[in-house]
Image (cartoon, rainbow, N blue to C red):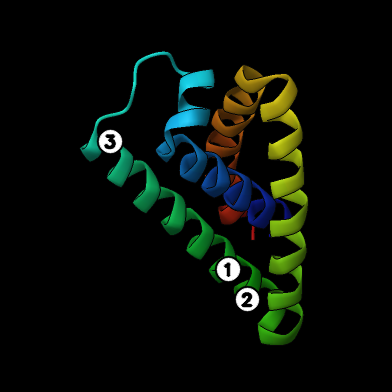
Amino acid sequence: MEAAVFCLAYLGFVLISLAAEGPHRHVIEPRPGPTARRVLGAAGWAALAGSFAAAVAGLGWGLGSLEWVCALGVCAMVLVLLLSDRPRTALYLAVAAAVATPPLLLAG
């Protein structure tokens, strides 16, 4: 369950950053339209909420919320470092996280 929390948190941060014009331009060439920006932002916030739900479901309110905050910090730091040096790698890692999350959630 802990790996799913990190995967969802990273995926959420990547989607939220793609909703912004600057990081989106570095990773994917065309400018996102207003609808795409809203959809990416909403999907990012939904992934972060799913990350919180997975953390609380796995460890309870006390430790789950602590794990979630730690996952947010680690994933944000990884994303900032990747976006500054290798923006395409950040996107590829987000795709890998999206693919890995359902089996991790089903594994419990």
Residue type at the position of mark 2: Val
Q: Position of residue 91 (x, y in %)?
A: 57, 26
In which quadrant will I find the N terminus? bottom right
- In the rendered structure, the answer to whether residue 79 lies left or right of residue 106 reads right
Mark 2 touching mark 1, by CB under 8 A? yes
> From the viewer's perspective, is 3 left or right of 92?
right
Residue 44 marker: none
- For marks 3 and 1, give the CA distance: 24 Å
- Most extreme residue toward the top is 29
Residue nearest the observer in this picture, 11 or 85: 85
- Residue at the far front: name it: 22
The image quadrant that residue 37 belongs to is top left
- Find disc 2 in the rendering and name its residue: 56
- SS at circle 2: helix
> Residue 51, located in which quarter of the rendered image?
bottom right
Q: What is the crowding at mark 3: few (fewer than 14 residues within 10 Å), some, or many (at least 20)?
A: few
Nearer to us: label 3 or label 1: 3
Regarding mark 3 in the picture, which secondary structure is present there?
A: helix
The residue that label 1 is drawn on is 52
Q: Earlier in the sequence, mark 3 or mark 1?
A: 3
Residue located 75% across and 68% down the image: 67
